[in-house]
Amino acid sequence: MLSGKSLLITGGTGSLGKELTRTILKEWPDIRRLVIFSRDEQKQFTMAQDYPGEKFPQVRFFIGDVRDLDRVKRALEGIDVVLHAAAMKHVHIAEYNPDECVKTNIGGAENVIQASLSSGVSRVVALSTDKACAPVNLYGATKLASDKLFIAANNIRGTRDIRFSVVRYGNVMGSNGSVIPFFLNRREDGTLPITDAHMTRFNISLREGVKMVLHAIKEAWGGEILVPKIPSYRITDLAEAIGPECDHPVVGIRPGEKIHEEMITSSDSFTTFDLGDYYAILPQVPAWDLDYYKEHFSAQPVATGFNYSSGTNEHFLTVSELRELIRVHVLGKEV
């Protein structure tokens, strides 16, 4: 799939970008070029130690900001596939720095689209979040706008052979700034603060997230929002899995937080199809034949009014399952 291709990852020094890099080099060592695009020179310097040029000549590190259209255009010269992972993602920080969040998450998305259209790129997959679904915070609102921009970009591609699609998923285990590393770091203090005892979240590992992105590169027709079928967990169970001997005081939700997250709303149900391992929210006016799409993927429409919420999910992880998943997927830490 990626043999002989050139691929660029925006925000490539983040948790998912690093796992994507590791997986791509393992599965497609004959990839022509793999470009890590990010604005943090220290993270690039650190990551480059794992990929020395003499051993990984196909890996390139490119300093740049998705806010800078000219720099993005320069980075995309000769690129076939773009994975857009760059974002401001901390909910409470976005609430207090809204302009910066808008510039990166919306302006940056538009720059990636425009640069891709003018650079001969053939596939663009943008990473989204459950917080973009019925958003109540600025971060979610900016990611919803970003999703809409990438979906609509299929309508302005003209005769170009390019497809834009989106993958949307929940909390990634062990990713930078997520709750699991936070709890692991706080465990030694003997206190794991819980925002609300009723809170639930979706859960996906980095490996599963990477698998979904690669699936979108290969299979997406352009215009879909792909959503994985993944389990949920209760925040109280997560605290018990990581720190059973710790105190678990309830401290109240932070600005912009939800008690439960959604990935598909009931309003989305009219254009949502079950593809087996994934759901697909299709564009209301697709650029391809809907009947052929349904036949090709054996896609079944979901029930009218269906919504996919972490609070009403059919599959909840137990304390023991959480403990094992953390052991396996979060740097092998013992919990």
Image: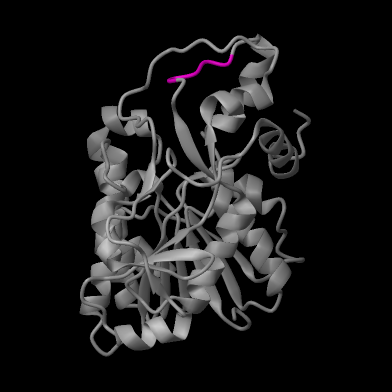
Q: Quadrant of the N terminus?
A: bottom right
Residue 96: say if magenta. Answer: no
Residue found at the very far front of the displayed protein: 303
The x and y percentages for residue 213 are 52, 64
Q: How is the image coloured?
A: one colour
Residue at the spot 27% in from the left edge and 36% down from the top edge: 137
Q: Quadrant of residue 180?
A: top right
Residue at the spot 61% in from the left edge and 30% down from the top edge: 181
The x and y percentages for residue 324 are 74, 38
For the image, the number of numbered tags is 0
Q: Is residue 322 left or right of residue 256?
A: right
**Relative depth, front residue between 332 and 33:** 332
Residue at the spot 47% in from the left edge and 46% down from the top edge: 170
**Relative depth, front residue between 128 and 266:** 266
Q: Main secondary structure of the magenta part?
A: loop
Q: Quadrant of residue 157?
A: bottom left
In the image, residue 312 sits, relative to residue 334, either above or below, namely below
Residue 194: say if magenta. Answer: yes
**Relative depth, front residue between 84 and 40:** 84
Q: Quadrant of residue 331?
A: top right
In the image, residue 280 sits, relative to residue 319, either above or below, namely below
Q: Quadrant of the C terminus?
A: top right
In the image, residue 69 sits, relative to residue 174, either above or below, namely below
Q: Would residue 107 be seen by someone viewing this image from the given angle?
A: no
Residue at the spot 69% in from the left edge and 14% down from the top edge: 188
The x and y percentages for residue 241 are 67, 27
Q: Would residue 52 be seen by someone viewing this image from the given angle?
A: yes
Q: Is residue 228 left or right of residue 33?
A: left
In the image, residue 81 sits, relative to residue 259, either above or below, namely below
- Tell me which segment is drawn in magenta: 192-196
The x and y percentages for residue 214 are 55, 69
